[in-house]
Amino acid sequence: MPLMGAGSSDDSPGQETPGSSSSYIPADRDIDFLQRDELRPLRLGLELLKPELIQTDQGIRSTIVVFGSARLLEPTRARRALEHASAESKAFPDDRIRQQRLAVAERRLALARYYDVAREFGRLVSSTCQIDGQCDYVIVTGGGPGIMEAANRGAADVGAKSMGLNITLPHEQQPNPYITPDLCFQFRYFALRKMHFLLRARALVVFPGGFGTLDELFETLTLLQTGKTRNITIILMGQAFWERLINWQLLIEEGLVSPEDLSLFHFAETAQQAWDLINRNHGGPTTQ
């Protein structure tokens, strides 16, 4: 029986050869290896570095972050949703769930005006600051629908760049179509996403929202209160909403925050008012 040469191989089906094992894949190309728990520090570093390098390459010098509900609808969609809920409630007047849906639809229509305000803000800031090739005060959002879509859309209205920082979630999520493609990022870790929101931020403009919006707002307030970050202007859009939602004076009366802590944020009602506050605190993009 002839001996097998050094370069020959056994082609029997199912038999693993040295080069076919996953151990042979270079570490930087081995996706399964990179997902191991022990590689988390490396993934965190990469998730910090990749968006940073891309933003540097794109010339992004400063940003304005816009937060708000993904559930807040564009006005025409909110009106259609209300019409649908109203028809259902009339057809089933004794159905408590349908009556609740009608009440929510009415509130959503009332809040829908903020979609237009966020869009106008994105348009105003971008047309004012992204001139002569400058990338100052670039609009940044969480990349989703609702208020986030509106702010990105405003930037797109005037042909300006804007950024979206998406996050992987258990349910399917897609970035809104108005983000500049080269500035659309997807994050695995909330902590790194939050860090990137603030790294270049001059202002945080916060529209009505839910748990996610509140989380991002209060984390930034805490960073400012403790001196971990500075020189970020926080603007809450819609004073009546925020004062109904949060009893700021209670925190002072109970001794849980200092009266001067309430100077960490401002209220505004319109896009122009928000932009005027930012200008007053930071000046225009050429004064940075």
Image (cartoon, rainbow, N blue to C red):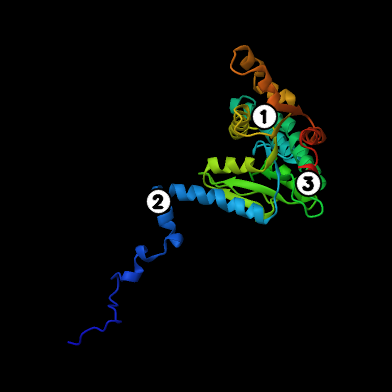
Q: Identify the amino acid type marked 1.
A: Leu
Q: Is 255 displayed left or right of 231 in the figure? A: left
Instruction: Tell me which corner region of the image, top left, top right, bottom left or bottom right, holds residue 123.
Output: top right
Label 1 environment density (alpha carbons within 10 Å; few <14, some 14–19, many ≥20) = many
Q: Is residue 284 above or below residue 161?
A: above
Q: Is residue 172 above or below residue 12?
A: above
Point out the tag, 1 or 2, that comes first from the N-terminus: 2
Residue 206 seen: no
Residue picked out by circle 1: 102
Q: Residue at x 79, y 46 (%)?
A: 129
Point out the image quarter for the N terminus: bottom left
Q: Disc 3 and disc 2: Cα gap in Å?
A: 41 Å
Residue 34 seen: yes
Q: Which mark identifies residue 36? A: 2
Residue picked out by circle 3: 126
Q: Residue at x 71, y 45 (%)?
A: 62
Looking at the picture, how far across and down is residue 237, in whole percent?
A: 73, 30
Q: Which circle, 1 or 2, is nearer the viewer?
A: 2
**Number of numbered labels in the structure image:** 3
Instruction: Tell me which corner region of the image, top left, top right, bottom left or bottom right, holds residue 110.
Output: top right
Q: Which circle, 1 or 3, is nearer the viewer?
A: 3
Looking at the picture, how far across and down is residue 253, in whole percent?
A: 63, 12
Q: Residue at x 80, y 41 (%)?
A: 284
**Residue lying farthest to the bottom in this orientation:** 2
Q: Which mark identifies residue 82? A: none
